[in-house]
Amino acid sequence: MHNKIYSIPQEVMHGTGDELFDHIVQCIADFLEYMGMKGVSLPLGFTFSFPCQQNSLDESILLKWTKGFKASGCEGEDVVMLLKEAIHRREVGEAQRTGSNACYMEEMRHIDTVEGDEGRMCINMEWGAFGDDGALDDIRTEFDQEIDMGSLNPGKQL
């Protein structure tokens, strides 16, 4: 497996949504070129580790920025569409991640938000905000609290 790490400059994190998503897609384009895969059609995977209201597999509304991000024009918007628009501008596909998350396979009969009972579905755990409700307060150290208070979004996505 090949990988390459890309940083997101603070001016992009605090710029516009178009600048942020264009930067992400530029990193994807760079990686595809690095791998000799420029122009190859690939499946698209998108992990967006921020609080969102996921309405469908291809629609997710950003509720609030965390982790130091403040890009304008994104909160309340469909981040999948923002990504698709940036991809269209560059004509590439991408997989980008920030932070960590997890998923698991669940029987469809146990999922109330979709129709049908047959088969299984991958469930996104969205554990990035785990602890926002105080569930981790008993194990947080003074160092955790100091770092949190110095962040742009204290008390969020601990």
Image: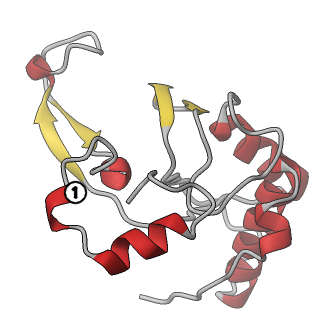
- Examine the image and state in which quarter residue 144 appears: bottom left
Measuring 44% from the left and 52% from the top, which residue is drawn there?
155
Comparing 129 with 49, the one in front is 129
Measuring 90% from the left and 51% from the top, which residue is drawn there?
89
The residue beneath circle 1 is 137
Residue 35 in the image, given as x and y percentages of width and height:
64, 87
- Examine the image and state in which quarter residue 125 appears: top left
Quadrant of the image for the N terminus?
A: bottom left
Q: Amino acid at mark 1?
A: Asp
Quadrant of the image for the C terminus?
A: bottom left
Measuring 71% from the left and 47% from the top, which residue is drawn there?
83
Q: Is residue 109 above or below residue 58?
A: above
Image mark count: 1
Residue 147 in the image, given as x and y percentages of width and height:
47, 75
Q: Is residue 127 left or right of residue 104?
A: right
Find the residue positioned furthest to the top.
115
Measuring 48% from the left and 54% from the top, which residue is drawn there?
49
Q: Is residue 51 left or right of residue 14?
A: left
- Examine the image and state in which quarter residue 15 appears: bottom right
Q: Secondary structure at mark 1?
A: helix
Comparing 145 with 97, the one in front is 145
Residue 24 in the image, given as x and y percentages of width and height:
73, 65
Q: Crowding at label 1, few (<14), some or many (≥20) Cα neighbours within 10 Å?
A: few
Q: Is residue 32 above or below residue 13?
A: below
Comparing 47 with 37, the one in front is 47
Q: Is residue 156 left or right of residue 140?
A: right
